[in-house]
DNA sequence: AAAGCATCCAACCGCCTGTTC
DNA sequence: AGAACAGGCGGTTGGATGCTT
């Protein structure tokens, strides 16, 4: 049995919002607050789907929205966050006050993906799935006509190639999954020592093939570690759970199977992330680390 | 000047998860 | 237990705009 649509679309407006609609929505939310999106349009006198109202409010009408003029700092942060988190726009947006996931997603697709690609080309490095998992988002290219005639149009902000090259660290593209369980098999172990602070990586099986791994596809393996974002107590790919599925202490962080066996890359990855968050690794606490992604 | 193409971005769509009943 | 609901997310679309020829 299929799901009913979120709302009846009969007689509802679609397309661009008018100033009058914006005013109605803003006025209603200022008076009654956010939420109850399904019933909101009717109460506010709007002929719009609730989801449409929510989107409009979240992306454009909220008073704290900052639009346009993405600074080079933000630019750089987006690139770095994307290299770590993949297309998790809401998470990335959460790190950029006033920015919305939609704006960042659009900005990435129109500007930054090209920039990153160009940088990768300039690096003259051989691309592989580990280092460049999100090669080029499928989006945005579908409708592009491949005339093969590339114009040198540089009207956008992605022109400053004179910026110092920064290390790019890539993770496999995270996916939404439900289960999270990291069995303690004799496979790779990633450990963080908060006293040093250092990360160490132990690999009991250089080939990276435990008995369990033989049964699982790489994607299924990844699914064991990367869970859906947004729920306290779950991991978003950076939280770690022990055998009893509890979030373990910072003094005993171990992660199995998911990470590549390239120790340097792993260490770089985490150091990179700490820099992103402007955190002092010596002050690191796994709970805040995990939580920081969700705030 | 205008036609054609490229690019941008607001908005829609479908799917997913958590909650409620 | 499972269906329905509500909210949230990422992918995609298509009209508007800009640029090139």
Image (cartoon, coloured by chain):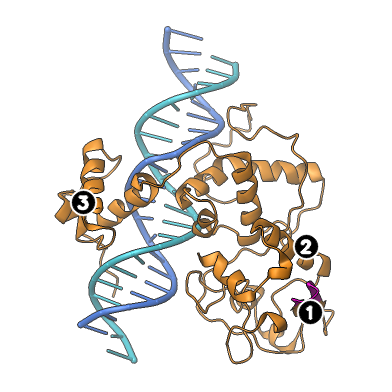
Chain colours: A orange, B blue, C cyan
Find numbered disc 2 in the image and state the secondary structure of the residue it sits on.
helix
Q: Residue at x 37, y 52 (%)?
A: A58
Report if residue A170 is visible in the image: no
Residue pointed to by mark 1? A208
Q: Residue A118, percent across and down? A: 71, 41
**Residue A149 numbered mark, or none:** none
Mark 3 burial class by Cα count in 10 Å: few <14, some 14-19, many 20+: some
Picture quadrant where residue A133 is located: bottom right
Q: Residue at x 78, y 72 (%)?
A: A197
Label 2 vs 1, first from the N-terminus: 1
Q: CA distance from mark 3 to mark 1?
A: 56 Å
Q: Chain of mark 1?
A: A
**Residue A28 numbered mark, or none:** 3
Q: CA distance from mark 2 to mark 3?
A: 48 Å
* Residue A52 counted in the magenta span: no
**Relative to C9, does residue A64 appear above or below in the rendering?**
above
Q: Tell how many labels.
A: 3
Answer left or right for A45 relative to C3.
left
What span is in magenta?
A193-200
């Amino acid at each position: 049995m299929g799901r009913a649509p979120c709302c009846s679309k009969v007689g509802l407006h679609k397309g661009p919002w008018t100033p009058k609609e914006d005013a109605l929505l803003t006025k209603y939310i200022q008076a009654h607050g956010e939420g109850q999106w399904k019933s909101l349009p009717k109460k506010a006198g709007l002929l719009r789907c609730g989801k449409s109202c929510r989107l409009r409010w979240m992306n454009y009408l909220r008073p704290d929205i900052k639009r346009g003029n993405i600074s080079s700092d933000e630019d750089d942060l987006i690139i770095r966050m994307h290299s770590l988190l993949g297309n998790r726009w809401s998470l990335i947006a959460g790190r950029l006050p006033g920015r919305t996931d939609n704006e960042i997603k659009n900005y990435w697709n129109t500007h930054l993906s090209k920039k990153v690609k160009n940088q990768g080309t300039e690096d003259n490095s051989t691309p592989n799935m580990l280092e460049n998992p999100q090669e080029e988002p499928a989006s945005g290219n579908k409708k592009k006509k491949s005339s093969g005639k590339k114009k040198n149009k540089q009207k956008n902000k992605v022109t400053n190639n004179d910026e110092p090259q920064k290390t790019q660290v890539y993770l496999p593209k995270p996916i939404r999954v439900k289960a999270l369980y990291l069995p303690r098999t004799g496979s790779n172990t990633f450990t963080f020592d908060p006293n040093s602070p250092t990360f160490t990586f132990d690999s009991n099986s250089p080939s990276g093939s435990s008995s369990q791994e033989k049964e699982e596809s790489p994607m299924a393996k990844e699914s064991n570690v990367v869970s859906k974002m947004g729920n306290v107590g779950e991991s978003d790919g950076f939280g770690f759970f022990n055998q009893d599925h509890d979030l373990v202490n910072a003094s005993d962080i171990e992660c199995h199977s998911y990470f590549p066996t390239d120790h340097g890359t792993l260490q770089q990855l985490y150091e990179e992330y700490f820099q992103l968050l402007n955190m002092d690794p010596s002050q690191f606490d796994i709970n805040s680390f995990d939580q920081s992604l969700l705030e």
